[in-house]
C-alpha cells in the first residue's frame, strides 16, 4: 500500500505553511511515497522548487493550488484544491496557470475565482473561449471530453463547512451546485481528519459524514491530510502563522487548529486515519477503497516535467516580434558584421582578425545552442532603451562576449580587457545565458512599460522575488503571538539588524551590545520563547514582490507556463522567482535601475544646459590622468564602487594608474577575495615588497596583470585549460565545481594526471592545486569587474572635470551610501559655492548655475524641505519668481507649517532683501498672515500691491533665538548648507588636540590620536578571521576619517559603537601604502556628553540629527581623555 | 460525568498501536470495540515544556474488568511511549 498526499502546503503559503518544498519532498521520499503534490494557497510560488526536488528524489510531481472560489454573484464558496492533470501535453498545467492568474486578475489581496470560470478552465477551454465554442485549446482530441483539472471539495469548501455543521441537506444542495457547473469527472470530495476530540472540527465525525455524502451522490472521495508542515514539531510555527494572519495574540485567535496533526504523515499513519474514518461511519467503502481512489487521482495528476511544463526548454520570443523575417542566425551574422566597422573603427589588421576569429568562435556556440533569437532579443531591448535616450550599460558575464559588444548590447571591449566568452556561454554550460542591463534608475519603469508595448503582454511579465522573514519582522510577529507589550517588542526589534533571526540565540551570547537583552531573556520564560519563535520564523516566505530588475521575455506560451499577478507597477508579475527561470525555460533580462546612471545622465544634461557642450560618456578616452589622480587622493566620495570606507582605504593603497587597475581594485574588494587575503598579496607584489610568483612561464600571460595573485574566474579557467587541456568551456564547468567538496578529488586527479604530459613539473602542479583548492568558488568574474569599472571611471571623470554638475546629480539621485549632508560637505571641500534654498530660484531638483566669478554653484532643491507636500513644491516651481510675500502666499497656498519652515530656513529671505537679521520680522509677519489665503485662479497674477515685510522692532521669534543658520538648515532640510555642522566644535577640537581628518594622512604609522566628528557610516563587513569588526566613518568638516573597532574595544564601548552620533575617538593610526590611512579605535565618547571633569564647555547644538544618546561617562574615563589631551 | 484519574498504567497494544487492555490497580481491563484516538491541543505559549508536540494523544476506549460493567475511559499516551489512565467516564 502507498499513499500520496494531494493537499500539501509549503512555506510558500505565506503565514500558513511552514516547511520548504524541498524538505517536504525529502520527507515524502523517506516515507517511500510514489508521488507528492504541492498545493499552496493562492499560487504556484513553490511549484518549480517542488518539481525540481521531485525529479531529484524520483517522485512523481503533482501540482495544484488551494484557492478561494466564488459564485457568479460574488458569494464566497469557500476554498478548494485545484489539481492539474498530467501527461496531457501541458493542457492541465496551462489551465492551472490560467486559473491562478484569473483568481488574481482583480488585483485583490484576497484572490478568488468564479466557479464558472474555474469550470471553463477545468474543461480545457482557454480563458477566452466561451464554453460551447468549437475548438478546445487542449492538444489531443480526447482531452476535449475529459477534464484537465480536478477539484477537491474539502472541509474549507462551502460543502465541507455545511457538513461540519451537520446541515447535510444544505450540503447536498451546495454540492449539486458544483456538480451542475463543473465538467463531469472533475469533482472529488476531500476527506480530512486531524483526529480532534470527538465533537470538534477536525474530528472523525465530519470526515466520515463527508465520505457518506460522496457515497450518496456517487462522487469519488479521496483522503488528504491538508498538510501545513512536514513534521509534528513544526505545529508551533503554524500556530504563530495563524496568529500573524489574524493579527491577534495566540490567546485571542479563535481558529487555531484543534490539533497538531496537519503534518506530512507516512502511509502507515494515513492508513490508520482511513480506517478510523470508514469504521466509525459504517460505510460501504473500506479504507482500501478510499486510499485506492486517492492513488488513482494521484496517478491522473502526475505531471511529466518535460512534456507538461516544458522543463528546461528555453522559449524565446518569436522572430517576427524582434523584426526578423528570415533565419535568425543569418540576421545575427549581418548585425554582428556591421558592428565591426562601428566599434573597431581604427583597429589594426591583426586586431581585426582577432575580432573576426573570436566572433566566428562565439557564433558557432550560439548556433550550436540555438540561441540566435536570444541575442537578437537582448540587442533589440538595448536598442529600444537607447532610442528612448536612456543611459544603458551591460553588466555580468555577457560583457565577455565580442558578439554583445558588436551588437551594441555591451560597451566594454572584451579582447583588450582579457575577457572570456566561455565564462558567459559554452556548450558545456547548462544554464541559460544571462545579460544584465544597468539603466537610469529614474526611468526604469518607463522602460518596462515600453517593453510590454513592444513585445506584447502575452510575451512579457515581470519577475518576482520572495520576501522572507528577517530578524526584525520575525521578532515582531513572534512578540505579537505571545502577546508581549508593543514597547518591549520594539525595543528588542531595534537591536536586531546585524544578523539573521536564526542566529538570535547565538547573537545574544556573543554580541556585547545585546548583553542587556540577553540578561532579560535569561530571566524570563516568555522572552526565551520569543527567541525560539523568532528563530523558527526566520527565512519563511512572507509575500512576493516585484524583483528590482527582472523582466521575463518569452513567446506567446508565457501565460501557460507561469501564473501572473499584479505588481505594484500595474504590470503583470510572474509568481516565479529568479531560481525558477532556468528550469522553466524562461528568459529573463535583468534591467536594473542604477542611480549612478541617473546621476551621470543628470550631470551630462546640466553641463549641456550650462555650456552647450554635449558629452558622450561612453566615448571619453579611458586614460585621463587627472581622473586617476582624483581616485588616488582617496577623495572618492560619490564615485561609483569606490566610495565606501573600505574602498577609500584600498584605492589609497593600490593607487590606480590605468583602467585595468580599477577592474582589479573592484574585483579585489569582494567578500571572497577579501576572505582569502588577496588584496594584501596583490599589493605586496604591486608595490615591490614581494616578488610576483607566476608559477610557470606558461601561466604568466594570464597572471601578470594581478602580479601572480589569482583573482578572476577567467584566470582560473585559463589555468585549468593550460594545465589539463580541457578547453575553456569545460574549464568554466570545473571552476564552478571548485566550490563543491565532492567534486574536488576529480579536479585534483585531472590536474596531477594531465599536468605532466602538458609540461608542468610536480612543483608547479602542486602550487596550481593549492591555488585552485583555496580559490573555491571565490574570486570574481573579470567581466563583472570591468563592467563595474566603466561607470567608476566615468563618474570619476565627471567628478574631476565637472564637479558641480556631478555633485548636483548625486544630490538629486542619491546613488551612494553616504548621507546627503556629507555630499554637501564634499561640495564645500571642493570649493563649489552652495546656493541656499530660495523660493525665487530653487527647483524641484538640484541645479547648477554658472556664477559671475566663473565658478559653478549648486542650488539647493525644494524637495529637501521636510514636511512640505509635493503639490506645494510643484506650485512654487511653477509660479516662481514671486513679486511679494503675498504673491507667494496666494499662488503657492502653503500650509502653515510649510510657510513657517520656509521662512525659518531662509528660503523666503528674498522678501527681506536677503538681510538675515530681519528673519525675526519675517517669521513674525508670516505667522500674522494667518488668515486663509485668497484663492487665485492658476496662471493669473494676484492683484495685491507690493507690500514689504514691515520692520518690527524688538520682535524675537523664539524658534530662531540662539540658533545658527546651520541648525535651522539641519532642522528643516537635514543638510548643513551655510556651514558644516561640526564647525561649532572646532574650537573644542583645538583645545582637546583632535587631529583634523584631512591631516591624518600626514601622520606616521602608530601615532596616538584623538579624532572626532559626526557619524556618517557604520559597517560590519565579514572578516577573514570571523571576528566582528566595526568600521565607523566620522566627518569632522575637513574630511572623512575611518575608524575600526576590534572586539576588545567594542567590549569597552558597548552599544555606543553603534548609537553615538557625535563621536570622539581615541586610537592609533594605521597606514598602509601611499594614502591608506585609518585609525584603530580603543575608546569612544559621546561628544555631547563629555564629562564635566574635562572642564570643557561643549557648545551644545540646538539640534541633534539622528539617534544620539546621552550617556555620562564616569570620571575615570574623563580623566583619561584629559591625560591624552594634555 | 468524567472523573479525572491521571495515573500511570501499563497498556497492552496491538501491532498497529491500538490499546487492547490495561492494568489499573490489581485489575486488568479488556478493551472492546474499536478504540478511537484523538488529540487535544495545549496552550503551549502559556506553559513551560517541550515544543515538539502541541497536542496530547488520547485514546477513548470502552473497557471492563469483569466483562459485565463497560465504561468509557480516556487513556493518555505520553510522547515517551508511557501510558496514563486519564479520565473515567460515568
Image: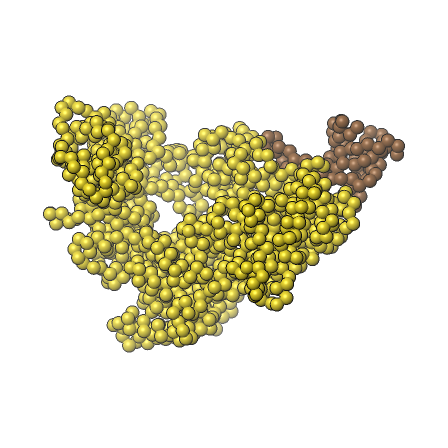
Residue B50, compared with residue A769, is above or below; it is above
Instruction: Find residue A864 and report its horizontal and vertical position in percent.
Output: 27, 40
Q: Nearer the viewer, residue A117 or A652?
A: A117
Image coords of residue A501 (percent x, y): 49, 41
Q: Is residue A172 left or right of residue A589?
A: right
Q: Is residue A452 left or right of residue A747?
A: left
As drawn, the chain in brown is: B
Q: Is residue A306 above or below residue A26?
A: below
Q: Residue at x 29, y 46 (%)?
A: A1077
Identify which residue is drawn at 49% across, 70% down: A754
- Would you say residue A1126 is visible in this rendering? no
Is residue A467 at least partly visible in the picture? Answer: yes
Between A1022 and A578, the one lying in front of the other is: A578
Which quadrant: the C terminus of chain A?
top left
- Location of residue A389 (image quadrant): bottom left
Which color was chain A given?
yellow
- Figure quadrant of the N terminus of chain A: bottom right
- Residue at x-position 27% and y-position 47%: A812
When asked about the image quadrant of residue B34, the answer is top right
Tell me which residue sits at (49%, 68%) in the image.
A428
Query: In the image shown, does A773 or A32 lie closer to the viewer?
Result: A32
Amino acid at each position: 500500500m502507498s499513499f500520496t498526499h494531494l493537499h500539501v502546503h509549503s512555506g510558500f503559503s505565506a503565514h500558513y505553511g511552514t516547511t520548504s518544498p524541498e524538505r517536504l519532498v525529502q520527507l515524502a521520499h523517506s516515507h517511500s511515497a510514489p508521488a507528492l503534490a504541492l498545493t499552496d494557497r493562492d499560487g504556484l510560488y513553490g511549484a518549480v522548487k517542488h518539481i525540481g526536488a521531485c525529479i531529484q528524489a524520483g517522485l512523481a510531481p503533482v501540482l495544484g493550488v488551494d484557492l478561494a472560489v466564488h459564485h457568479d454573484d460574488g458569494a464566497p464558496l469557500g476554498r478548494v484544491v485545484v489539481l492539474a492533470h498530467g501527461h496531457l501535453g501541458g493542457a492541465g498545467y496551462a489551465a492551472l496557470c490560467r486559473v491562478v492568474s484569473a483568481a488574481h486578475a482583480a488585483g485583490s489581496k484576497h484572490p478568488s475565482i468564479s466557479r464558472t470560470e474555474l469550470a471553463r478552465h477545468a474543461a480545457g477551454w482557454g480563458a477566452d473561449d466561451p464554453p460551447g465554442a468549437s475548438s478546445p485549446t487542449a492538444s489531443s482530441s480526447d482531452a476535449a471530453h475529459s477534464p484537465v483539472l480536478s477539484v477537491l471539495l474539502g472541509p474549507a469548501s462551502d460543502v465541507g463547512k455545511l457538513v461540519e455543521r451537520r446541515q447535510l441537506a444544505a450540503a447536498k444542495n451546495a454540492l449539486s451546485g458544483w456538480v451542475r457547473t463543473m465538467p463531469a469527472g472533475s469533482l472529488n470530495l476531500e476527506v480530512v481528519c486531524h483526529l480532534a476530540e470527538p465533537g470538534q472540527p477536525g474530528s472523525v465525525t465530519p470526515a466520515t459524514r463527508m465520505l457518506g455524502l460522496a457515497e450518496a451522490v456517487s462522487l469519488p472521495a479521496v483522503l488528504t491530510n491538508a498538510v501545513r508542515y512536514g513534521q509534528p514539531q513544526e505545529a508551533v510555527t503554524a500556530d504563530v502563522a495563524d496568529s500573524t494572519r489574524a493579527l491577534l495574540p495566540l490567546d485571542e485567535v479563535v481558529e487555531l487548529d484543534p490539533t497538531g496533526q496537519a503534518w506530512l504523515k507516512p502511509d502507515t499513519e494515513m492508513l490508520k486515519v482511513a480506517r478510523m474514518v470508514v469504521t466509525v461511519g459504517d460505510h460501504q467503502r473500506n479504507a482500501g477503497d478510499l486510499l485506492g481512489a486517492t492513488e488513482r487521482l494521484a496517478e491522473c495528476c502526475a505531471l511529466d516535467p518535460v512534456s507538461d511544463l516544458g522543463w528546461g526548454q528555453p522559449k524565446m520570443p518569436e522572430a517576427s516580434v524582434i523584426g526578423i523575417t528570415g533565419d535568425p542566425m543569418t540576421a545575427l551574422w549581418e548585425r554582428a558584421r556591421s558592428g565591426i566597422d562601428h566599434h573597431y573603427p581604427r583597429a589594426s589588421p591583426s586586431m581585426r582578425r582577432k575580432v573576426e576569429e573570436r566572433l566566428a568562435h562565439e557564433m558557432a556556440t550560439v548556433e550550436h545552442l540555438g540561441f540566435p533569437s536570444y541575442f537578437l532579443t537582448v540587442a533589440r531591448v538595448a536598442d529600444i532603451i537607447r532610442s528612448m535616450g536612456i543611459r544603458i550599460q551591460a553588466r555580468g558575464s555577457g560583457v565577455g562576449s565580442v558578439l554583445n559588444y558588436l551588437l551594441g548590447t555591451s560597451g566594454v571591449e572584451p579582447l583588450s580587457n582579457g575577457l572570456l566568452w566561455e565564462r558567459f556561454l559554452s556548450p558545456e554550460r547548462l544554464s541559460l545565458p544571462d545579460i544584465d542591463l544597468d539603466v537610469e534608475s529614474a526611468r526604469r519603469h518607463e522602460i518596462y512599460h515600453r517593453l510590454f508595448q513592444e513585445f506584447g503582454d502575452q510575451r512579457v511579465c515581470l519577475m518576482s522575488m520572495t520576501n522572507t522573514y528577517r530578524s526584525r519582522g520575525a521578532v515582531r510577529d513572534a512578540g505579537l503571538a505571545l502577546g508581549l507589550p508593543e514597547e518591549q517588542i520594539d525595543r528588542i526589534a531595534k537591536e536586531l539588524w546585524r544578523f539573521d533571526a536564526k542566529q538570535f540565540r547565538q547573537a545574544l551570547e556573543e554580541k556585547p551590545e545585546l548583553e542587556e537583552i540577553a540578561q532579560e531573556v535569561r530571566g524570563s520564560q516568555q522572552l526565551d520563547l520569543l527567541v525560539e519563535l523568532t528563530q523558527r520564523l526566520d527565512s519563511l516566505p512572507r509575500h512576493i514582490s516585484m524583483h528590482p530588475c527582472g523582466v521575463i521575455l518569452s513567446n506567446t506560451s508565457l501565460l501557460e507556463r507561469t501564473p501572473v499577478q499584479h505588481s505594484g507597477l500595474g504590470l503583470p508579475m510572474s509568481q516565479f522567482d529568479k531560481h525558477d527561470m532556468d528550469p522553466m525555460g524562461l528568459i529573463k533580462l535583468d534591467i536594473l535601475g542604477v542611480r549612478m546612471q541617473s546621476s551621470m545622465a543628470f550631470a551630462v544634461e546640466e553641463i549641456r544646459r550650462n555650456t552647450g557642450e554635449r558629452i558622450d560618456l561612453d566615448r571619453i578616452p579611458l586614460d585621463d590622468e587627472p581622473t586617476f589622480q582624483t581616485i588616488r587622493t582617496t577623495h572618492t566620495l560619490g564615485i561609483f564602487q569606490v566610495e565606501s570606507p573600505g574602498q577609500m582605504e584600498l584605492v589609497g593603497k593600490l593607487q590606480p594608474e590605468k583602467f585595468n587597475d580599477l577592474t582589479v581594485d573592484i574585483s579585489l574588494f569582494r567578500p571572497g577575495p577579501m576572505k582569502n587575503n588577496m588584496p594584501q598579496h596583490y599589493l605586496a607584489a604591486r608595490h615591490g615588497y614581494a616578488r610576483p610568483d607566476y608559477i610557470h612561464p606558461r601561466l604568466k600571460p594570464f597572471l601578470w596583470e594581478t602580479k601572480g595573485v589569482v583573482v578572476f574566474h577567467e584566470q582560473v579557467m585559463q589555468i585549468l585549460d593550460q594545465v589539463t587541456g580541457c578547453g575553456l568551456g569545460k574549464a568554466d564547468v570545473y571552476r564552478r565545481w571548485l566550490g563543491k567538496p565532492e567534486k574536488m578529488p576529480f579536479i585534483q586527479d585531472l590536474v596531477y594526471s594531465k599536468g605532466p604530459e602538458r609540461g608542468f613539473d610536480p612543483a608547479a602542479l602542486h602550487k596550481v592545486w593549492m591555488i585552485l583548492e583555496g580559490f573555491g568558488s571565490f574570486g570574481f568574474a573579470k567581466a563583472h569587474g570591468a563592467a563595474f569599472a566603466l561607470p567608476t571611471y566615468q563618474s570619476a571623470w565627471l567628478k574631476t572635470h565637472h564637479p558641480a554638475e556631478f555633485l548636483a546629480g548625486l544630490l538629486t539621485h542619491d546613488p551612494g551610501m553616504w548621507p546627503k549632508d556629507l555630499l554637501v560637505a564634499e561640495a564645500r571641500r571642493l570649493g563649489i559655492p552652495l546656493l541656499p534654498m530660495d523660493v525665487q530660484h530653487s527647483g524641484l531638483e538640484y541645479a547648477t548655475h554658472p556664477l559671475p566669478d566663473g565658478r559653478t554653484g549648486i542650488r539647493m532643491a525644494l524637495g529637501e524641505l521636510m514636511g512640505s507636500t509635493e503639490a506645494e513644491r510643484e506650485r512654487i516651481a511653477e509660479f516662481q519668481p514671486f513679486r511679494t510675500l503675498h504673491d507667494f502666499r496666494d499662488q503657492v497656498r502653503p500650509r502653515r507649517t510649510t510657510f513657517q519652515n520656509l521662512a525659518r530656513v531662509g528660503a523666503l529671505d528674498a522678501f527681506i532683501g536677503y538681510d538675515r537679521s530681519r528673519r525675526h520680522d519675517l517669521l513674525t509677519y508670516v505667522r500674522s498672515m494667518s488668515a486663509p489665503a485668497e484663492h487665485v485662479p492658476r496662471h493669473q497674477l494676484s492683484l495685491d500691491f507690493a507690500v514689504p515685510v514691515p520692520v518690527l522692532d524688538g520682535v524675537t521669534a523664539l524658534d530662531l533665538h540662539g540658533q545658527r543658520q546651520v541648525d535651522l538648515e539641519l532642522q528643516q532640510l537635514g543638510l548643513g548648507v551655510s556651514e558644516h555642522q561640526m564647525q561649532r566644535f572646532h574650537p573644542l577640537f583645538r583645545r582637546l588636540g583632535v587631529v583634523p581628518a584631512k591631516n591624518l594622512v600626514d601622520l606616521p604609522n602608530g601615532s596616538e590620536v584623538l579624532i572626532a566628528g559626526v557619524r556618517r557610516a557604520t559597517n560590519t563587513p565579514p572578516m577573514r578571521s570571523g571576528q566582528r569588526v566595526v568600521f565607523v566613518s566620522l566627518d569632522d568638516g575637513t574630511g572623512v576619517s575611518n575608524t575600526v573597532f576590534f572586539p576588545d574595544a567594542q567590549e569597552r564601548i558597548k552599544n555606543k559603537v553603534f548609537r553615538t552620533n557625535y563621536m570622539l575617538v581615541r586610537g592609533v593610526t594605521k597606514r598602509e601604502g601611499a594614502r591608506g590611512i585609518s585609525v584603530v579605535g580603543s575608546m569612544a565618547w559621546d561628544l555631547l556628553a563629555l564629562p564635566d571633569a574635562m572642564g570643557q564647555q561643549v557648545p551644545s547644538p540646538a539640534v541633534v540629527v539622528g539617534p544620539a544618546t546621552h550617556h555620562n561617562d564616569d570620571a575615570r574615563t574623563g580623566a583619561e581623555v584629559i591625560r591624552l589631551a594634555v | 460525568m468524567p472523573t479525572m484519574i491521571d495515573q500511570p498504567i501499563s497498556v497492552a497494544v496491538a501491532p498497529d498501536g491500538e490499546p487492547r487492555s490495561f492494568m489499573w490497580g490489581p485489575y486488568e481491563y479488556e478493551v472492546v470495540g474499536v478504540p478511537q484516538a484523538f488529540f487535544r491541543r495545549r496552550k503551549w505559549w502559556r506553559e513551560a515544556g517541550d515544543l515538539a508536540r502541541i497536542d496530547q494523544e488520547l485514546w477513548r476506549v470502552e473497557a471492563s474488568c469483569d466483562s459485565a460493567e463497560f465504561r468509557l475511559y480516556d487513556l493518555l499516551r505520553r510522547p515517551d511511549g508511557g501510558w496514563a489512565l486519564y479520565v473515567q467516564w460515568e
